[in-house]
Image (tube, helix red, strand yellow):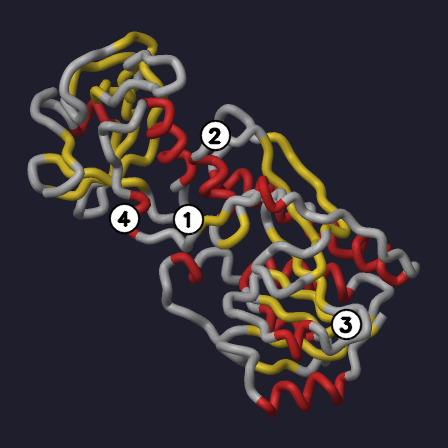
């Protein structure tokens, strides 16, 4: 099939590579301009550069809603549009233009985790698996019929970075597999159960600030979800910002004021956290590694030499 691709960053780059390696013909690529937003500089392989290396025409747009782009798409005469990690609304006259419409590739197991940063949110929320879904685009965000979907398990120590690498490897089989099904003439795809749908917004600094009233189990997942190269989860100690780079749930149970620095346990320093809503137990979070305001990374026990005071949400 003749394909126009809308995509951005590494997800779009990997999708384009899969398309270029397939039997399908990529006739045009639409991508966003480079951004200085913290999250958009992560996994930022250039879709435009890959397309240009293969002689594919490239159009740069923040939004795909102008008449010039519409005419370029009509001239490209695609059988289908494939979108992955496209950041803005695609209007109906665009996504319905090709005979087979638009196939959107999304990094979650739809209908759950529609929207932004699904891997991070899924890890924070303790989901047992994550995955990739290829679905046909309609008027509701990430809600169209599912053509193909694959999942991978979330391991007990997986970080968001680990999950990125696990799921990015699913892009090629999910995308090309879905295109092959559509090209074969199949149209009976899986309707999404909208009663199971969840939606999550873009990550911002407030979302990575540690709230010590959360349970140690939840905070440990937050730290793993904010693994490098993502911005690290942070708190404040004696008025200064402190990033938490590593943590485990304490072996013992600790009560008291959330955020209180308790004492050393194994390789970590125990910080009192809130009770787990599921078990009612109050474990501490054993912080193992931190980074200070001046950029020093060091073991938590070395940093907390006084073993006193509190960690706070704000300075």
**What secondary structure is marked by label 4?**
helix
Residue 265 x/y as whole percent: 26, 12
Disc 1 target residue? 229
Q: Earlier in the sequence, mark 3 or mark 2?
A: 3
Using the numbered discs, state the Cα–Cα distance from disc 1 to disc 4 in whole angstroms. Answer: 18 Å
Disc 2 target residue? 126
Using the numbered discs, state the Cα–Cα distance from disc 1 to disc 2 in whole angstroms. Answer: 21 Å
Q: Residue at x 58, y 42 (%)?
A: 195
Categorize mark 4 by other alpha carbons within 10 Å: few (<14), some (14-19), many (20+). few
Categorize mark 3 by other alpha carbons within 10 Å: few (<14), some (14-19), many (20+). many
Q: Earlier in the sequence, mark 1 or mark 3?
A: 3
Residue 90 x/y as whole percent: 58, 72
| Closer to the eye: label 3 or 2 | 2
Residue 313 x/y as whole percent: 17, 38
Residue 306 x/y as whole percent: 8, 22
Up/down of 160 relative to 250, above or below: below
Q: Is residue 274 left or right of residue 33?
A: left
Q: Nearer the viewer, residue 77 or 99?
A: 99
Up/down of 305 relative to 7, above or below: above
User: Which residue extends farthest right?
Assistant: 184
Disc 3 target residue? 3
Instruction: Inspect this view and state whether residue 64 appears.
Output: yes
Circle on res. 206: 4
| Closer to the eye: label 1 or 2 | 2
Q: Are marks 4 and 3 in contact (CB under 8 Å)?
A: no
């Amino acid at each position: 099939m003749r394909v126009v691709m809308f995509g951005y960053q590494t997800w779009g780059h990997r999708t384009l590579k899969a398309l270029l390696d397939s039997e399908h013909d990529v006739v045009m690529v639409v991508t966003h301009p480079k951004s200085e937003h913290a999250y958009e500089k992560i996994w930022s392989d250039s879709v435009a550069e890959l397309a240009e290396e293969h002689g594919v025409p490239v159009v740069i747009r923040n939004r795909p809603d102008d008449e010039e782009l519409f005419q370029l798409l009509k001239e490209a005469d695609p059988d289908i549009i494939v979108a992955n990690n496209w950041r803005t609304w695609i209007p109906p006259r665009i996504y319905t233009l090709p005979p087979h419409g638009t196939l959107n590739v999304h990094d979650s197991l739809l209908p759950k985790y529609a929207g932004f940063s699904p891997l991070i949110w899924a890890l924070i929320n303790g989901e047992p698996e994550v995955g990739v879904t290829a679905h046909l685009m309609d008027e509701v965000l990430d809600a169209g019929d599912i053509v193909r979907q694959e999942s991978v398990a979330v391991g007990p120590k997986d970080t968001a970075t680990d999950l990125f690498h696990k799921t990015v490897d699913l892009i090629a089989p999910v995308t090309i597999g879905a295109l092959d099904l559509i090209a074969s003439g199949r149209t009976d795809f899986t309707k999404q159960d909208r009663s199971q749908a969840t939606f999550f917004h873009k990550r911002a600094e407030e979302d990575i600030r540690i709230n010590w009233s959360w349970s140690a189990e939840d905070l440990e997942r937050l730290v793993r979800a904010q693994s490098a190269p993502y911005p690290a989860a942070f708190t404040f100690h004696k008025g200064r910002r402190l990033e938490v780079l590593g943590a485990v749930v304490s072996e013992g149970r600790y009560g008291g004021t959330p955020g209180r620095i308790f004492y050393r346990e194994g390789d970590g320093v125990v910080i009192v956290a809130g009770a787990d809503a599921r078990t009612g137990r109050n474990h501490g979070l054993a912080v193992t590694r931190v980074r200070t305001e001046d950029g020093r990374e060091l073991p938590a026990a070395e940093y907390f030499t006084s073993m006193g005071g509190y960690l706070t949400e704000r300075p």
